[in-house]
Image (cartoon, helix red, strand yellow):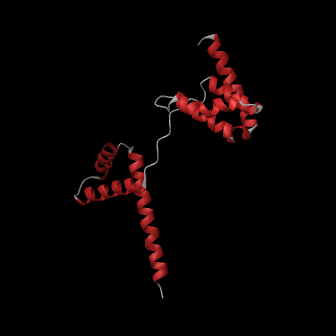
Amino acid sequence: MSDEAERGKATADRIGELSQSDPRATDSDFAAMVRRVGVAMGAGGEDFMSAGAGLAEYLLSDRPIEAGERRLLALLVLGETRRAPSRPAANIARKADIVAAFRAAMAKGRLRKNVIADLSGQFGISRSSVEAYLKDAREREEMLAEMGRVYSKP
């Protein structure tokens, strides 16, 4: 690692320590703009011009920049806020499709681990996500059954 890279890493570490002492700096609209630019810097991120417009306008305005905001900018420049865009959560209908496909395959007598592996590949999600969807569906059904028992009593 070059001397400059080591300086950058040491600076990022120091900024991280300072940021922990002032948590308000990461909860602001400014912090959200910095994070958005950081995501755009990552692979597959948003168009940089769109992501950076709000931050650029803020920086060009007469608004003061606090110490915590300066630290966030420093982290951005050092590439420490760069990250991949988050994946959208699966919607309810998709989860229901996965659970229905699992039950249909199980009704045909297939092995559970094979069905989960197949669904993982078919829907492009991890095996643990398939397991989590099945667990959620089972818990929801148990809760509804319990509610039916409780509210059906005279």
Q: Image check: 52 left or right of 116?
A: right
- Determine the residue positioned at 46% across, 31% down: 44
Q: Considering only vertical position in the picture, is 107 above or below 1?
A: below
Q: Nearer the viewer, residue 121 or 77?
A: 77
Q: Position of residue 75 (x, y in %)?
A: 65, 27
Residue 54 sits in quarter: top right
- Determine the residue positioned at 39% across, 54% down: 95
- Determine the residue positioned at 68% across, 42% down: 27
Q: Considering only vertical position in the picture, is 120 above or below 138?
A: above
Q: Quadrant of the N terminus?
A: top right
Q: Considering only vertical position in the picture, is 124 above or below 74?
A: below
Q: Position of residue 66 (x, y in %)?
A: 77, 32
Q: Image check: 99 left or right of 67?
A: left
- Determine the residue positioned at 74% across, 33% down: 68
Q: Image check: 50 left or right of 8?
A: left
Q: Position of residue 57 (x, y in %)?
A: 66, 31
